[in-house]
Amino acid sequence: MLCKQIVKMILVISVIFIFGCSDKAVEEAEFPPLKTAAAEVDGTDYQLEKGNYRWVRKKGLETETVTTDNASPNQMADHLKPITVKPGQKVKIKIEDDPVIKVFLWNETGKEREIKLEDDQITVPAGKGKYIYEVLAEWTNGEISYTFAAEIQ
């Protein structure tokens, strides 16, 4: 009698474990993952515009890859409201799940140069004008390019 109850309990726990851990809808919703990104200026967060991204994951014996192509940061910036900053001000880059971050300054013709990042912050130039930044975030299984524009007044 006791043995039958133990077998039934093991069977019920096994069924719950198998079906509880294989929710296909949740699994599909997580790929590609959504990662929030913001530029913080004077305590206010400004959402970064997501551009190109690439994600890879193993699914059994197969590898699943998602890659997108988007407008360049220059083209994206045409439709973005610039963040107003002061000359030489610090801008903190905040991206979910602690990726490796690189920041690039763009000019009219393309990527100009990489910007030094210290403690997840960049320092904007002293000269007035509009500056376009690409933030490249890299995780072990993917990367996302984000764009923001800064207006120095």
Image: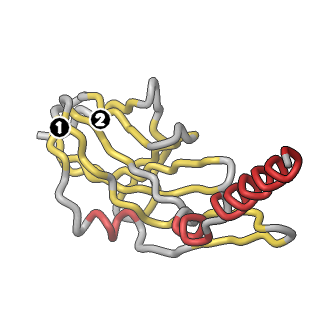
User: Are the residues tagged 2 and 1 within 8 Å (C-beta)?
Assistant: yes
Give the x, y percent position of residue 30: 54, 62
Q: Which residue lies most toward the top here?
A: 119
**Horizontal side of residue 57 vs 47, given as left or right:** right
Category of crowding for the residue at label 2, using alpha-carbon neighbours closer than 10 angstroms: few (below 14), some (14–19), many (at least 20): many
Residue at which label 1 appears: 85
Compare residues 138 and 57 and report the one nearer the observer: 57
Residue drawn at 79 percent across, 57 percent down = 11
Q: Is 24 located above or below residue 49 in the figure? A: below
Could you tell me which residue is drawn at 58 percent across and 56 percent down?
A: 143
Return the disc, 2 or 1, that comes first in the chain's sequence: 1
User: Percent position (x, y) of residue 1?
Assistant: 85, 49
Q: Position of residue 128 (x, y in %)?
A: 16, 41
The CA distance from mark 2 to mark 1 is 8 Å
Find residue 124 and name its label: 2
Q: SS for tag 1?
A: strand
Kind of residue indicated by mark 1: Val
Residue 54: percent from left, percent from top: 60, 65
Which residue is found at the position 57% from the left and 40% from the top? 100
Q: Which mark is residue 116?
A: none
Q: Residue furthest left?
A: 153
Q: Is residue 108 left or right of residue 11?
A: left
